[in-house]
Image (spheres, rainbow, N blue to C red):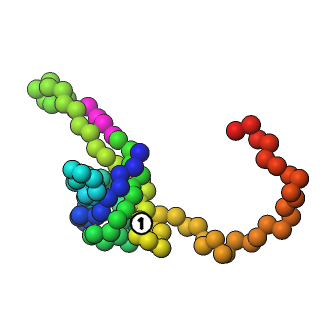
Amino acid sequence: MEVQGKIKLIGDTKTFGNNGFRKREIVVTTEEQYPQHIMVEFVQDKTDLLNNFRVGQPVKIGINLRGREWVSPQGETKYFNSIQGWRIENLEAGQSSGQNVPPPDQFEPANDLNDEDYDDLPF
């Protein structure tokens, strides 16, 4: 799944517990009739993905929905959801920070093409 919009806020990296769990939050405002402010959290080594982004920048974020159950000391069960990011891509024209693909003119042209060859794959 993906969320697309402009960065409204990028939080600082926070560390929790004795094992050093790291979390960083970003808020993206969608660009639709009724804009939504979506908070996405990046955890552990993924927190560093946000270092090269700034407020106002259009981005596309690859996300996973996470859910968990928690039982209080009184025996009451509650459920929590979170949106966890695993990839972020810059959507500004001419820039790409989510992928490491060289520009098209850096690829070698294919010279061994034959007009009689055709793609006969069944899919």
Q: Is residue 43 visible in the rendered structure shown here? A: no
Nearer the observer, 8 or 78 = 8
Horizontal and vertical percent position of residue 83:
31, 46
> Which quadrant: the N terminus?
top left
**Residue at the spot x=18%, y=27% of the render?**
77
**Residue at the spot x=86%, y=64% of the render?**
112
Q: Main secondary structure of the magenta part?
A: strand
**Residue at the spot x=82%, y=49% of the render?**
118
**Residue at the spot x=76%, y=70% of the render?**
109
Q: Amino acid at mark 1?
A: Asn
Q: Which residues are magenta?
A: 66-70
Horizontal and vertical percent position of residue 44:
37, 56
Quarter holding residue 24: bottom left
Give the farthest residue toward the top.
Answer: 75
Tag 1: Cα neighbours inside 10 Å, few (<14), some, or many (≥20)? some
Residue 68 among magenta residues? yes
Q: How many marks?
A: 1
Q: Is residue 91 left or right of residue 74?
A: right
- To which residue does mark 1 refer? 90
